[in-house]
Image: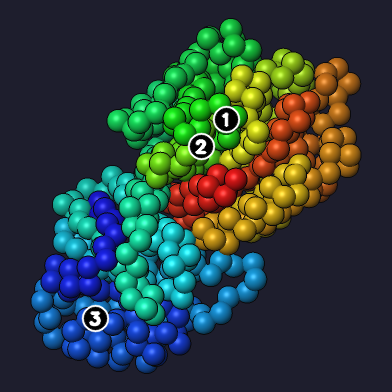
Amino acid sequence: MPTIRITADTAELVTTSHSLVVVARKADLTDGWPTQGLPQLIRDAVSRAAADARPGAGAVVSTLVTEGSLRTVSVVALYDQVSRHLSDTRSYEISQAIKGIARPDGGRVSVILGLADAAHATGAVLGVARSYPVYTRKTTGKGTAGEVLVHVTLRQGPLTQGLDRLGYAADATALAQRLVDMPTAELDTAVFEAEARKALEGLANVTVTSIVGDDLLREGLRGLHAVGRTAMVAPRLVVLDYAPPSAEGQAPIALIGKGLVYDTGGLSLKIVGDRMLTMKCDMGGAAAVLGAFQLLVRANTGKRIVAALSMAENAIGPDAYRPDDILEMHSGKTVEVNNTDAEGRIALADAASYIARKYKPTVLIDAATLTGAQLVATGKWHAAIMSNDADLEARAVTAGLKSGDHCMAVMFSPELHVVEFKSTVADLRNSVADRNNASTSASGLWVYLHIEDLGLKWLHIDLAGPAFMDNRGTGYGIGLIAEIVTAL
């Protein structure tokens, strides 16, 4: 399947590719500057196609008289302006417009991104990367691997700075998409751990450790153990530690990812309609954390980062945890299980408590495909974020606009929502009593209740909607998390 490479060489776009896609705002296409430096024949073809291109209507394709190896030109017109809750990177617009067109088919495709500002480059490149998912088990079309060249240009000329980081972002997106798209028969918890280790192999100042199976009990991770203990492959906590010399003596930033490789719902089985279908995507939070971690390390981020991937398969079997069971979490709180399909928060909270107490970070960020309620609250394209710190929340919203990973804040109100988890026999229940009482906020709060005594800044990212669309992983969250960490 195709790989993505960033290039500043305009000539390479024409001499080595069979298809060219030009993406820019409609007004900029009309001005013609995104194609500066290209042969006149191609500029004329783009101009003709641009005249017919309409924002939101997909690509307009123009057939070329041969120029180098080029055969076709496609033009994507973006809206000249976007509303205030959308990113000027146009990440979503780009991914929706170019997916399905200009496939490499064993050769090479070039994409020109005409951007108004260099700051929009990462989000725009992520939009391209999402358009070319890498996982397939199709028996037809084999041998279609190829390359997508991405060329970022501004009115003043091609972007030449920061291209390596753009490439790292594209690579991390491909990694996360591939992992999310893999069925659990191919990506159980052991394989997921192996994939994480492989993704970080050879990177300096990185240590990877794991706690597997019954060793989780010895470390007090009884909630994570319960969720995954009946699966054929053991649950595990995989810890990624990046400690560059420049960060010596610094408290780390912690990243926690929900890594449920499959969620049957447990004994509270997902039996309504096709609710179980696509539950391979329930490790999208861990995939995003792994991708962001890889990107930050490759970009030589001078900060200590500790990430934890909380991996389990919520299966059914003779040793499955049950409704009415009482679990003692790593935090020391007891939980009466009233819904085994609210397992992600159990796995996430145990990991958060373990990392927070062992590594004592200043900031803890968790990412999870946590609730269907997130889609009701903020939709398919905006993750729901919540935080106990107003400044961190604002930074996350800004990071979403800068990275193209849209997000919106939902309320953080423990006083109003802790009542949803009242139990007569334990400290908490694990699922809300009333789904109509801001369920996505309440569910995120549940994770916080296991670290609330530590006084650290906390951000929760519920990416259930944007992490998986059209039966494909998107790699959502990599840009957002990496941008937040960079800005801290």
Residue bearing the label numbered 1: 250
Along the line of sight, which residue is nearer the eye, 59 or 77?
77
Kindly identify which numbered label has been placed on residue 37.
3
Circle 1 packing at 10 Å, graded few (<14), some (14-19), many (20+), is few
- Tag 3 secondary structure: loop
Whether residue 267 is visible to the viewer of this picture, yes or no, is no
Residue bearing the label numbered 2: 303
Q: Earlier in the sequence, mark 1 or mark 2?
A: 1
Is 368 located above or below residue 42 in the figure?
above
| Residue at the image position 51 percent from the left and 58 percent from the top | 403
Question: Could you say which quadrant of the image residue 407 lies in?
Answer: bottom right
Which numbered mark, 3 or 2, is in the foreground of this view?
A: 2
| Residue at the image position 30 percent from the left and 67 percent from the top | 151
The spot of residue 283 in percent (x, y) is 50, 37
Is 8 located above or below residue 68 in the figure?
above
Along the line of sight, which residue is nearer the eye, 288 or 425?
288
Circle 3 packing at 10 Å, graded few (<14), some (14-19), many (20+), is few
The spot of residue 243 in percent (x, y) is 46, 29
